[in-house]
Image (spheres, rainbow, N blue to C red):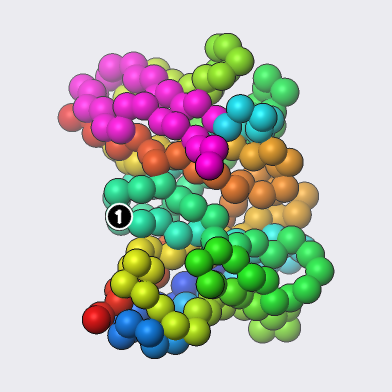
Amino acid sequence: AQSVTQLDSQVPVFEEAPVELRCNYSSSVSVYLFWYVQYPNQGLQLLLKYLSGSTLVKGINGFEAEFNKSQTSFHLRKPSVHISDTAEYFCAVSDQSSASKIIFGSGTRLSIRP
Amino acid sequence: EPEVTQTPSHQVTQMGQEVILRCVPISNHLYFYWYRQILGQKVEFLVSFYNNEISEKSEIFDDQFSVERPDGSNFTLKIRSTKLEDSAMYFCASSATGHSVDTFGSGTRLTVV
């Protein structure tokens, strides 16, 4: 079985500062990894995903994440955040043989201060 | 941009009543899903659906739950006899390939009283 740990429940940063949202996973099998964003009163939107290939994955809105197999991590980064990035961010994992059953982390609330 | 549409956005129902949550997936997608998020908890997988049958379901998805694709566009989740603990945000999702769940709807908030 897989699990996902998002170490920070809340991350406050100043506008235009860099941000890293941490995610660690555990699994005994090969996995796919995802980051989703949920803006207030909206659904989940896929930011980026790692299925295979390059370990550095670029997503929408200037976000990127790096898959580190040895550290079982998939941290999300953005070099300069905007007020519009205020949202909840969810890291998620699925077993490659059962890709529809996504296991979500508990989420990190990113709040941007002007 | 194509989106997954869910109706209603909020539904209140009495305990023991049947409820149907409706979803219109993206038109050329073949894989459909329901997830839910109880307030303050993680998003949880309920069921996946492909080729007119359930392909996978979680322990949560017991006999009280069922899914259906009644026509070419809708995908529904039925809860036969709602319990207080069914109160949650229910998300529908769809995928073209089944390798990743790319698109979720904005959810239906179900409140059981």
Judged from the image, the secondary structure of the residue bearing numbered disc 1 is loop
Q: Residue furthest right?
A: A53
- On the image, which quarter does residue A53 sit in? bottom right
Up-down: is B57 above or below A57?
A: above
Q: Is residue A42 left or right of residue A30?
A: left
Q: Is residue B69 visible?
A: yes
Up-down: is B19 above or below B57?
A: above
Up-down: is A30 above or below B111?
A: below
Q: Is A32 inside the magenta-drawn segment?
A: no
Q: Residue furthest top?
A: B71
Query: Which residue does the image show at 73% across and 66% down from the upper left?
Result: A28
The image shows a total of numbered marks equal to: 1
Q: Is residue A42 left or right of residue A101?
A: left
B22 vs A84, nearest the viewer: A84
Query: Which residue does the image show at 73% across and 83% down from the upper left?
Result: A70
Q: Is residue B57 visible?
A: no
Residue B9 locus on image (x, y percent):
30, 33
Q: Is B17 inside the magenta-drawn segment?
A: yes
Q: Chain of mark 1?
A: A
Magenta residues (range): B1-25
Residue, disc 1: A40
Q: Residue furthest front?
A: B1
Q: Is residue B83 left or right of residue B32?
A: left
- On the image, which quarter does residue B25 sit in? top right
Query: Which residue does the image show at 35% across and 35% down from the upper left?
Result: B108
Mark 1, other Cα within 10 Å: few <14 / some 14–19 / many ≥20: few
Q: Is residue A110 left or right of residue B2?
A: left
Query: Which residue does the image show at 74% across and 75% down from the upper left?
Result: A55
Instruction: Give the quadrant of the C terminus of chain B.
Output: top left
Residue B56 locus on image (x, y percent):
65, 35
Amino acid type at mark 1 = Pro
Residue B58 locus on image (x, y percent):
56, 40
